[in-house]
Image (tube, helix red, strand yellow):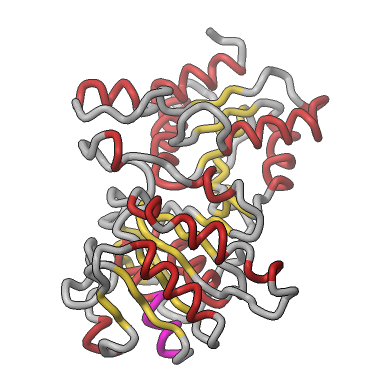
Amino acid sequence: MKTIQFREAICQAMSEEMRRDETIYLMGEEVAEYNGAYKASKGMLDEFGEKRVIDTPISELGFAGIGVGSTMTGNRPIIEFMTFNFALVGIDQIINNAAKIRQMSGGQFPCPIVFRGPTASAGQLAATHSQAFESWYANCPGLKVIVPSNPYDAKGLLKSAIRDDDPVIFMESEQMYGDKGEVPEGEYTLPIGVADIKRKGKDVTIVSFGKIIKVAFDAAETLSKEGIECEIIDLRTIRPMDYQSIFNSVKNTNRLVILEESWPFGNISTEITYQVQNQIFDFLDAPIEKINTADTPAPYSPVLLDEWFPSSLDVIKAVKKVMYMN
């Protein structure tokens, strides 16, 4: 094992796959000469050249469409958005072409493409640069949605995403690129659609994913000192979702708290809440609690941002509520 940064794990995954398969290329804003907006493609232009690591104009709709079209000629593109907030400009290509072309062509055209970049908030970036898009894309049949929380998962899942014959939305975070973690030096992949139990516990199940899962870990450490042991499930993949791992955990703990960086209405935690109460209602000893951001656009003020974003105290309160300790 070697300890590397999240951005290095992303770079390793792309580079290893591009060495393995010459049909893979990387395209996006600043991915080449600048080594990536967050240095996730550092050194790749030097190794693979300008025909496989391609800088683009600020035209997300254009280069997303080029990527989708190139899959029909046998390529496997990786399209980087500097942030998924900018992907709103290219969402027509993602939803109406990438996600649907296999069905519309009667299976003649698979669409092996990865759209990757950071999602959700990243500090004082204000309302238009702080939106979580996981539930948006997960709502569309034909897309797979992955949101890793650490370097090990990021590398293994990105390699699997690049090899997948369906379009994959791979979501990262500006605030995770510097995170460090152990990553095997040898070849490995992780299966898409399999959650991971990051912390064992017997009292309450906490389900989360992406960077906000750190808040769950902080809360679990505090609660452990009070004798409350939380089991933390990292979804890793949003669609397809590993419902069974959630069900198995809740059957043991009988309580569920869901932590998600998203507005409260119509999100991933809403879907999980429905599935759990519909499938294993008799195992619940308390109503499900879900924790989301405030139901407003993200504020710029750091004071307001702290109030808007879920905290470990919010998780602690929710855990104690489902344990009838409040």
**Would you say 39 lies left or right of 320 here?**
left
Residue 24, percent from left and from top = 44, 83
Residues shaded magenta: 13-20
Residue drawn at (48%, 35%) of the image: 260
In the image, residue 247 sits, relative to residue 25, either above or below, namely above
Seen as rendered, the residue at the extreme left is 34
Secondary structure character of the magenta stretch overall: helix
Residue 194, percent from left and from top = 63, 57
> What is the total number of numbered labels drawn onto the structure image?
0
In the image, residue 174 sits, relative to residue 208, either above or below, namely below
**Would you say 169 lies left or right of 83 here?**
right
Residue 243, percent from left and from top = 70, 45
In the image, residue 234 sits, relative to residue 306, either above or below, namely below
Residue 285, percent from left and from top = 73, 19
**Would you say 79 lies left or right of 146 here?**
left
Residue drawn at (49%, 45%) of the image: 209
Residue nearest the observer in this picture, 130 or 1: 130
Residue drawn at (26%, 87%) of the image: 50
**Magenta stretch holds residue 16:** yes
